[in-house]
Image (tube, rainbow, N blue to C red):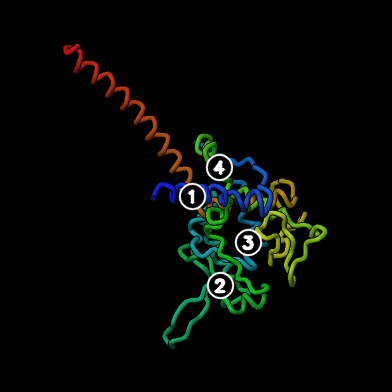
Amino acid sequence: MLRPILAAVLAASLTAAPAFAAGDAPPPPRQKWSFSGPFGHYDRGQLQRGFKVFREVCATCHGLNLLAFRNLSALGYSEAQVKQIASEYKIQDGPNDQGEMFERPGRPADRFPPPATWKNEAQARMLYSGTVPPDMSVIAKARTYERGFPWFIFDMVTQYQEQGPDYLVALLTGYEDKPPAGVTLPGTLQYNKYFPGHGIAMPAPLSKDRVTYEDGTPQTTEQFAKDVTAFLMWAAEPHLETRKRLGFQVMVFLIIFAGLMYFTKKRVWESAH
C-alpha cells in the first residue's frame, strides 16, 4: 500500500519541480562566475563595484540587515575606508540620558541600517504596490529556480551551485518595455520575462551609465547586474572560499587515508593468503 503512494508522490515531484524554470518562465542564461567550481574565488574588484551599485541603486529600497560595516574589510577595503563608509550612514541609537532615541554616525561594528524610504511594512506596501522590498542579505541563496530532473543530477557532477546568481542577473536584465501580445498585467506591475508570473512591482533598477566606475569597467546594464549579484553572493556566503579550500583539503586527506588503509589491509592479511 505504501509503495504505490511513494511512487505517486515521486512522480508528482518530478513533474512539478521544473515548473518554474521550464513552464512559468524561461531558464536564466548561465553566467561565468569567478566563484564557481571547486576552486572558485571572489573577484575583489568586482565585489567593490557591486557594493557601489548596491549603495547607489539598491539601498534606496532594500536593506542589508545581516551585514556589518566591518565585514567590508573582506572586500579589500582598509580599516580607514571601512570607518569612512560607516560614518556616511545614520544609525539610530539610545535611549540617551533623557530617555530619547537619537541618531549618530555609523561605526564599523554597526550593521547596515534599513532603507530610509520606508519606516515599516505598511508604509512599504503603500509605496510599492502592496509589496515589501525584501532584505538583500541572503537574497542570492534564497532566490533561485528549480532545474528539475535530470538536470540536478548533472549539477551534482559538475558542482553547479550558481542558480541563485544566474537568476538574479536574469531578473535584473529581463525587463521589457511592454508585455507580449495577449498578456495583461494588473496595476503598475512591470513585465519581466524571468520573474514568476512575469508581473513584478519593482521597476527596472539598472540602466546604462546609471553608476560611474572609476576603473574603466564598461558601465552597462549587464555589467551592473553581474557586479551587484557577485556582491550579494558574497554577502550571502562570505566564507565560500574558506569552505571550498577546506573541502579540497578534506578530499586530499581522504584519498591519502584510503590509500594507507588499503596497503595496511594488504600487509595485515598478507600471511593469511
- Read off the residue under disc 1: 8
Tell me the distance, in whole angstroms, between the alpha carbons under discs 1 and 4: 16 Å
Label 2–label 4 contact, CB within 8 A:
no
Where, quadrant-wise, is the C terminus in this rendering? top left
Name the element at disc 2.
Answer: strand
User: Which of the numbered marks, if any, corresponds to residue 55?
Assistant: 3
Label 3 crowding class (10 Å Cα cut-off): few <14, some 14-19, many 20+? few
The vertical placement of 98 against 22, above or below, is below
* Farthest-out residue, right: 181
Q: Which mark, by number, is residue 149?
A: 4
Vertical arrangement, residue 41 with respect to residue 259, above or below: below
Q: Nearer the viewer, mark 4 or mark 3?
A: 4
Looking at the picture, does residue 35 appear above or below residue 74? above
Q: Report the amino acid beneath label 2.
A: Lys
Instruction: State which tag comes first along the sequence, 4 or 3.
Output: 3
**Total number of numbered labels?**
4
Secondary structure beneath label 4: loop
Q: Nearer the viewer, mark 1 or mark 4?
A: 1
Query: Is residue 81 visible to the viewer in this orientation of the structure?
Result: no
- Mark 1 or 3 closer to N-term? 1
Q: Is 183 on the left or on the right of 135, as rendered?
A: right
Depicted 97 relative to depicted 59: above or below: below
Residue at image position (74%, 50%) is 219
User: x, y percentage for residue 133?
Assistant: 61, 68
Label 1 vs 4, first from the N-terminus: 1
Q: Which residue is mark 2?
A: 90
